[in-house]
Structures are given as C-alpha cells and as structure tokens.
Image (cartoon, rainbow, N blue to C red):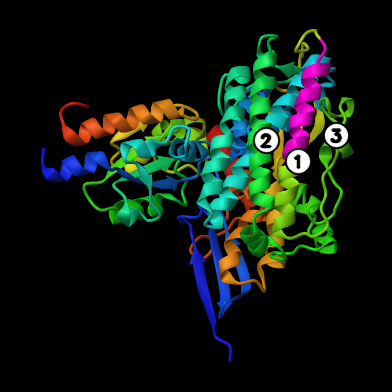
Amino acid sequence: MGLKEKILARSIYVFHVSSGSCNNCDIEILDCLTPRFDLERFGVVLVGSVKHADAMLCTGSVNRLTVPRIKKLYEQMPKPGFVIAWGACGSSRGLFKDSYNTGAPLDEIIPVDAYIPGCPPKPEAVIGALVKLKEKILNKKAVK
Amino acid sequence: MSHKATIPIGPYHPLQEEPEFYKLVVEGERVVDVDVRIGYNHRGIEKISEGKSFDQAIFAVERICGICSGSHPIACVQAIEEIAKVEIPERALFIRSIIQELERLHSHMLWLGLAGHFLGYNTIFMWGWKYREPICDIMETVTGNRQNYGIMKVGGVRRDIEKEHVPYILSRLDEFTKQLDMLKGAILDDPVLHARLKGVGILTKEKAIDYAALGPTARASGVDIDARRDYPYAAYPRVKWNVITQKEGDVFAKTVVRILEMYESVNIIRQCLDKMPQGPIDAKVKDVPPGEGIGQIEAPRGECFHYIKSDGTNSPMRHKIRAPTFMNFATFRETVIGETVSDATIILAAIDPCYCCTERMVVVNSKDRELYKGPDLIKLSQEKTRLIKEKMQRL
C-alpha cells in the first residue's frame, strides 16, 4: 500500500453518470450526500467534472446513445479510477434487458469495481459499498 | 454589432441530474435562441409494457420516473380499470390519494432543494433534502420502499395502511410542517431570492394556454387547471382543498405555487386519514376485455396521461404515455429568450423538467442509413411472404 492509495481511500471524489436511468438512483445519490446520510463523513464529495473524480457512479441501463459517451468519460477519468455500478439497471440492466434501445451491459463497456444491487439501493447499501471500495483500494486481495 | 456564440450545456453537466443537451445561442449576455436535444434517457418503456401482462405493466411504468413512481402506476391502473369496468373499494381510493399526496410533498421539496442548488444557494439545497426525509420515512413504513412503492394494483392497492401507522404518519407530518414553515419563511422573505427570481422567465397566461402548459407551471401563470379537480379520481372529490394559482408567471410565482401546494397536500393527507373507511382494499378482476381506456391524473409536475388498448389477451396491445414535462418544456423558448445567461439555468429548471418521463421517441439517423417508410415495409413484408411460400412449395 503506497501513499497514493492511503490518501485516495480517505477522500473518494465521485462523479455521477446517468446513462438512461429513471432518476430514482440519481436522487438517492443526492440523498446520500445530504445531511441525513452524509457521505462526506467518509470523504466522499460529488464533483462537477470527471477529470476531478476518483470514482464514477454509473446509474441506469446504458442506452445506445450513451455507450460512446460513457467510454469517453471513463477515458477522461484520471487513473487509478474506479467505477461503481449503481442499482439493478447499472448492474444487470434489470427490466430493460430486452429493450430495443439498450446497448451493452455496463461491465462490458468499462471495467466495474463495485456493484450495488437494488431498485433503488437504499442509502445504507451505498455506504456499505463505499466502505468495501475503500478496503479494495487499501488491500487489493481483501475484496474480490 | 452582433456576434452570436453558442453555449453547449450537457449531456453530462454538473448542474444536471439527467443527461440532456441544451444549446444556448447568446448575443453578449442575452440568450437569443435555445434548443434541447434529448434521447439519452430513452428506454422504450411503451414497447416493454406491451410485452408484459397487465399486472407486470404496472411495475414497468413505475420505472419510467423515480420521482413520479406513484403517479404513473395510478394513471396506468385507472386506464386498465376503465377497460375492465372495475368498481374500486372506498378504502383503496383513499390510500391512492394518500400515496399521491406524499409523492407530491417529496417531489416539490426535492425541486425546492434543486432550485436552491441552481441559484448557488446550497443551504436551501441541504435543508430541502434534509426535510424531505420524514416523507421518505413515511413511504418506507407504509409501502416498504423509499422510492418505487409498488403499491398500485388493478382493482385497488397491494398494501393496507395499518391502524398503528396512522399516529406515526401524523407525527412525522407535524414534524414536516414545522420545518416547512421555517423553509417557507426563509425562502419567501429572502431579499436575495426576490431579486434573483422576481420578473425572471415570465410566462404569460395567454402563452401558457397556447403552449398547453400543465401543473404548477400553468398555475403559476394564472391558468386554473388541476386534474384532481377537473377529472375527479381517487378520493379527491371526498376531501376539501384548494387549487393554488398565482398571476405573475415568473420563477418566483412557480416557487410560491409549489410551497403553498405542499400545505394543501398535508391538508389532504390529514383529511384522508381521518375519513378513511374500513373495508377491503382490492376488488377481484377476472379478465380485461377488448377495449380502450385512459387514465388522467395530476402528477407533481402536471397532468399525466396513459392510454391503453386491449385486444382481450393478458397484455396491452398499445400503451401510450404522455408525461407532463412533454408539454411544459416547449415553454423554454418563451421564457428563456431575452434573459441573461446567468438566469437561464434557473428558468430551465423552473418547470421541474423530468426527461426520463418525457422520452418516448427514438430519433433515427437517416444520413448514412436508409429509412423505411410504410410502403417500403409493406413491400418488404410481401417479399418475405413470397420467399416463405416458395420455400413451402419446394418442401
């Protein structure tokens, strides 16, 4: 574990990417960051540009129009960067698996580090996921 | 001297919750033209719904929008009930009204917070989202989930409001009202907000009618429409409440309408809990005969419309959805042109746009691909039939 990982694990800056979601996961992201659940306790801050971010929160079943944009955003993220698939749609495309406008699953487009299931995931699940991501950053063998 | 510049906003922009693309054409400080490109959220819900059974379609339409995840299912079940001619038990009607009003409370509070965020007033953003939590807690207690309630069903509702829940709901509502009083004072008496919002992005009454604006957007311009009163459904005819309207049509009027509507919603929930009769919560539905039905309800953003055509099988033959933002976002051109760039974001956000509700179409890029029209498809189909016939003859 280097100094870089140690600092990174204490302040994960996140960028929110909505790729055709239903707003549900998106408002839960904001819910997590506002006073009730307050993820800023763990150093998690929402940033405006992916170039400032350490992690991408991807919500929604990726539709055809957003596939190239998601790739581009991932390329722009400084490395080491992490991707969190948020919700049932982000993890497995959920209900929209058979839709004509749904592109590839998220983990076939970009590498995904953590999955948070649920429709929408409860803020408690989100806090759990970020704690696991922290462990993964600090000790790569701890979480598979 | 005029030099036009284009400011692109989106599709991924810090101010936006959802991916959408605005093109602002500016001349100096003034906005002279605006264009919106959407399609980043299209998921083909109408087609998905046509592949599901009537019971599953309700869960599918719930995923149209996370904020209106109580409104779309009500409109959908009302459309199906109109085809099947089901008589809904009294108690279920009251529960539907309660769910709808709770949803309106959390949606308006959410908008208030986001509006503060767009203005750079992050205190209101944090307050609004903090004070929204009692409503989410009530939802979790009553329906089992903070969002995506899954409570609507053809012929009634899935879960009852237990007797033990009523005092809890009332106490959390009291807590909410106290905080709302404080927030109302903080917003309506703030000289900075008056200066930022008054006279900005005015939509006149005539223009609101011309563009067929709906919900709080229309009511803030003095158009007295409300689907809850105009097309009575659920328990709304059985309770007393007022339709809030304002004359000015600017962003401040839209804020006032939403804040005052929250008080009406609390009032409706209290009356519903008081007047709710005992009895069953769902009626038996045998099958859905062929026919057409519509469901019109007042979602937090305006009137939401569902059309369902059934051919006698267990899934809809056609399901058409029109969300309120579809009508409201055409008013952008009227409100934003002529204003300064710094006010553009709050004007664009003032209608409380929800793009995942709106996106019901897919745009086909016809430049490098041949576009099939009706006659072409018929020709293709005839060609295929001929090929199959030849194949059959050979066999």
| Residue B163 location, quadrant | top right
Residue B325 lies, in percent from the top left, at 68, 49
Q: CA distance from mark 2 to mark 1?
A: 8 Å
Query: Where are the magenta residues, as a range?
Result: B262-277
On residue B241, the disc is 3
Count of number-bearing discs: 3
In the figure, B202 relative to B301: above or below?
below
Give the residue type at disc 1: Glu
Give the residue type at disc 3: Trp
Residue B73 lies, in percent from the top left, at 68, 29
The answer to whether residue B97 is left or right of residue B116 is right
Residue B159 lies, in percent from the top left, at 66, 14
Q: Earlier in the sequence, mark 3 or mark 2?
A: 2
Q: CA distance from mark 3 to mark 2?
A: 15 Å
Mark 2: secondary structure: helix
On residue B307, the disc is none
Chain ID, mark 3:
B
Residue holding disc 2: B105
Chain ID, mark 2:
B
The answer to whether residue B248 is left or right of residue B112 is right
Q: Main secondary structure of the magenta part?
A: helix
The quarter in which the N terminus of chain B is drawn is bottom right
As drawn, the residue found furthest toward the bottom would be B1
Question: Is any part of residue A116 visible from this angle?
Answer: no
Mark 3: secondary structure: loop
As drawn, the residue found furthest toward the left would be A2
Mark 1: secondary structure: helix
Residue holding disc 1: B261
In the figure, B109 relative to A76: above or below?
above
